[in-house]
Image (cartoon, rainbow, N blue to C red):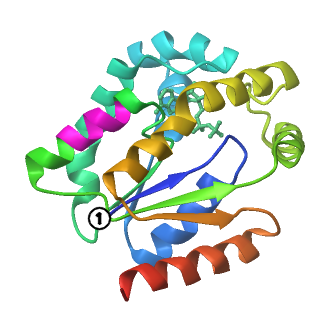
């Protein structure tokens, strides 16, 4: 099973991915968390991406594709993998398609979380107070939203054109509310 959790910054991908990881026993692969780890450990990769992330821009496709390529085989072991934060551009989606095709795998599902932009900004500013993520300032949040509309939204269209099952889920309300919706939607897919 290869799942993708998709949505704008602040839509709750990471929170829901953690729950899905427990529920489905699949491995959660978060490119944002991987990159933040590299920055914190001051690795060569971290030095390269830190500044880009701090402005809200996306890191180069080739770089993130290499990161995923190195980790995907292990993540796919057992019940499978849940991708969070990747693919974020159509170029990345094509690279993922090629990686999976090499292994004879395909994407099982895409869960797309929908949350109105005002609510997203409120959540991200609130998270900034709690976690102090350096990319959660008002200016950087706007840039991340712009990148999402400019580059990332098209990824959904890419999968829609390929006939991958996409489940659009209302991402408003409490994490429990959202998880219940995702759970109900995925139960529908697996029993089809
Ligand atoms: P968000 O909370 O905005 O969804 P993430 O935690 O997924 O953010 O990612 C944080 C930052 O890491 C992004 O703004 C971007 O700079 C970088 N990043 C993460 N995944 C990718 C990717 N697939 N392609 C390019 N940049 C990425």
Quadrant location of the C terminus?
A: bottom left
Q: Residue 168 falls in which quadrant of the image? A: bottom right
- Disc 1 is placed on an element classified as loop
Q: Residue 1 falls in which quadrant of the image? A: bottom left
Above or below, 143 relative to 169: above
Q: Nearer the viewer, residue 37 or 145?
A: 145
Q: Is residue 105 left or right of residue 8?
A: left
Q: Percent position (x, y) of residue 69?
A: 24, 36
- What's the magenta region? 92-98
Q: Percent position (x, y) of residue 54?
A: 67, 17
Q: Quadrant of ligand 1?
A: top right
Q: Is residue 63 left or right of residue 85?
A: left
Q: Percent position (x, y) of residue 145?
A: 72, 30
Name the residue tied to disc 1: 80
Residue at x 32%, y 19% (from the top left corner): 62
Q: Check if residue 85 falls in the magenta segment.
A: no
Q: Main secondary structure of the magenta part?
A: helix
- Disc 1 packing (10 Å; few <14; some 14–19; many ≥20): many
């Amino acid at each position: 099973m290869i799942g993708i959790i998709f949505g704008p910054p602040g839509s709750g991908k990471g929170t829901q991915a953690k729950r899905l990881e427990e529920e489905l026993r699949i491995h959660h692969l978060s490119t944002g968390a991987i990159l933040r780890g590299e920055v914190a450990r001051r690795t060569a990769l971290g030095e390269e991406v830190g500044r880009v992330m701090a402005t809200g821009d996306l890191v180069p496709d080739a770089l993130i594709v290499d990161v995923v390529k190195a980790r995907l085989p292990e993540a796919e072991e057992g019940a499978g993998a849940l991708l969070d934060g990747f693919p974020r551009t159509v170029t990345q989606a094509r690279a993922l398609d090629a990686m999976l095709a090499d292994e004879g795998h395909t994407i099982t599902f895409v869960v797309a979380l929908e949350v109105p932009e005002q609510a997203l900004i409120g959540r991200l500013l609130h998270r900034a107070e709690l976690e102090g993520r350096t990319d959660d300032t008002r200016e950087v949040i706007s840039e991340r939203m712009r990148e999402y509309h400019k580059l990332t939204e098209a990824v959904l269209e890419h999968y829609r054109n390929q006939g991958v099952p996409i489940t659009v889920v209302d991402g408003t309300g409490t994490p429990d509310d959202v998880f219940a919706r995702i759970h109900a939607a995925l139960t529908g897919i697996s029993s089809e």
